[in-house]
Amino acid sequence: MKLNLIPGESVGPFRVGNTLSSSIHMIEKYSEFLGECNIIYSQNNPLLTPTILELPKLGIKLHFCSYSQRIQVIEVSFSKITIVYSKWILSSPTSPPTFDHILRVIGASYPGHLMSKNKYYLHHYYGLSFSFPISKNDQLLLKQNNLDISQVFPDKTKLISKTLYIYYGDNFHQITPPKLALSSLYYQPTKVIPTKGIFFENEQKCVLFTHSIQDILVELGPPDKVYYKSFTKESIDELYNPIVQVEEFESLEKEKDTEKEKEKEKEKEQEKEKEKEKKKEKEKEKEKEKETKKEKETKKKKEKEKGKKKEKKNKQSQKTKKYFEYKETQPQFPSDYVWNYFQRGFDIIFNGSTHAIKKFILHTNFPNSIDFNIYQRCNFRIETFNNKTNKACKLDPFMNFDTITKVFGEPTRSLLHNSKSFSEFEKTYFYGFIGTNIIFEIFSKIRYIASVTIFDPTLLKRTDNNNLNKDQNKKTNKTEIFLKNKNQDIDKNSKSNNNSMDFNQINNKKNKKITIDDISDDSGSDSDSDSDSDSNDDDKII
């Protein structure tokens, strides 16, 4: 296979600055020619080392920036492909390039330098670097005498290069991918205000919780895909949010089961009725044989009329059955639906009944995630406040979970997101924080963010109101218990004072609704009665 070389730009279809997702899609599309692809990344810390796509058939390695996920360096081995530079064959599997051949094809350049760790010599051009393996003795000569490679090797045909590095710029030690075009939507900074929505700085567009579907279509255009959620699965905000009650879903399922049982019973009854009708028809046929021809003709006419009526009824019953069967397949209330924006790296979830935005989901696209290569990385900046210092702070997709806990404090109880079909990928946990409308999906090993869910902040207010109502109900229950106990004490005192209170008065007092003011009056009356009794005793002594 022949590939054209452009220094600082590309080799064949592989271009410096291409995204990870576009490169994988291209390899999948031309897999017959390019062969298999291996993804190499660090399982302990994927941000420290670049992500590599290896093509063993071609001997090419694509090194991607761990942050922007764009090609930084293209590493090419000369042993498996032929490389053409400006209509000249630079190398082939049978004849690898020598130092002399490189100078004749590409031209002269400044002296290179020695890489002692990897034991090879690098010869640089703008956007290109050739590596030459060197023995230890030759390394010592170059270091001690500060000699050039041409002085150590007068015969330049003996120096054979093994690998080629293509990159952007002229500094091999500080390689960065080229700048994106202003019109590019990839990896653009997106500001996130949890109480409002998402703001795209380059486009000067935004998506707010108050926006309608028409507003979003005007701002972002149509989604890449639309997905309708099922009701059996509970979303993460429903698990953390006490507003959503699972009992409602269970009651709906029970109602469905009861309706199905009723329909089965109706079908059995209809079958029994059909059997009875068949028996009656047989009896009628026997009677018809005994009757005369005239009577048969008249009865046939009547039966035809009845048959037509029955056919109409049967058709109507079949229509009603089909209607109810269709109604069972349809959801009893509209399902939530998701708009996927894969190129922007986020989702929008809408309420099925109100069509309002329920939440946003932002994806980080780490190689060990379940959603890898489905979404492009969202370069978000979440603007929040530190709960400890009350100062403004920003959260990005490269923060560890320990730094997040320093901002929000201790999280709530975690929820495991795991499935048998996703056993190859790393497990993730969902964490929420009290007083925030943000839920983080965190990897179990590397402790980085897999996704961020931001739900409607009005749900927090509803939960607070529900908690207040619960507290008020508890207080009212306590006052009712206190009043009941007080009524019982009053009844006991009334029974003990037989001289001062009649039986009818006691019954009237029991039936009377007592308030807190009545209790205070009763306590005062009790004290007065005690004082009166004491005065009577004093009179007796006198």
Image: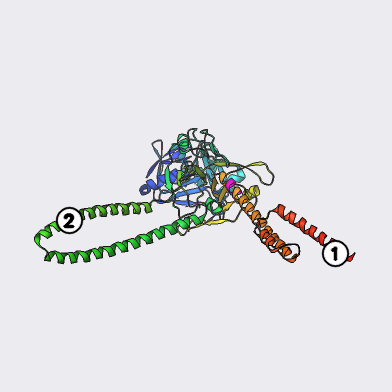
Which residue carries the number 1 mark?
537
Seen at 79% across and 59% down, the residue is 529
Callout 2–callout 1 Cβ contact below 8 Å: no
Name the residue furthest right.
Answer: 542
Label 2 – label 1 distance at C-alpha? 105 Å
Quadrant including the N terminus: top left
Residue 327, given in percent of the width and then of the height, sits at 37, 51
On the image, the x and y values in percent for residue 56 come to 43, 51
Coloring scheme used: rainbow
- In depth, the one of 17 and 231 nearer the eye is 231
Can residue 217 be seen at all in this image of the molecule?
A: yes
Principal secondary structure, stretch drawn in magenta: helix
Query: Would residue 162 be counted in the magenta stretch?
Result: no
Mark 1 Cα-neighbour bin, 10 Å: few <14, some 14–19, many ≥20: few
Residue at horizontal 43 percent and vertical 38 percent from the top = 222
Q: Secondary structure at mark 2?
A: helix
* Between 243 and 283, the one nearer to me in the picture: 283
The residue under label 2 is 302
Q: Nearer the viewer, mark 2 or mark 1?
A: 1
Q: Say which quarter of the image contains residue 485.
A: bottom right
Q: Quadrant of residue 502?
A: bottom right
User: In terms of secondary structure, where does tag 1 sit?
Assistant: helix
What residue type is disc 2 on?
Lys
- Residue 95 visible in image: no
Q: Amino acid at mark 1?
A: Asp
Q: Residue 542 at what x, y percent from top left?
A: 90, 64
User: Magenta region: which residues?
Assistant: 460-464
- Disc ID at residue 146: none
Disc 2 packing (10 Å; few <14; some 14–19; many ≥20): few
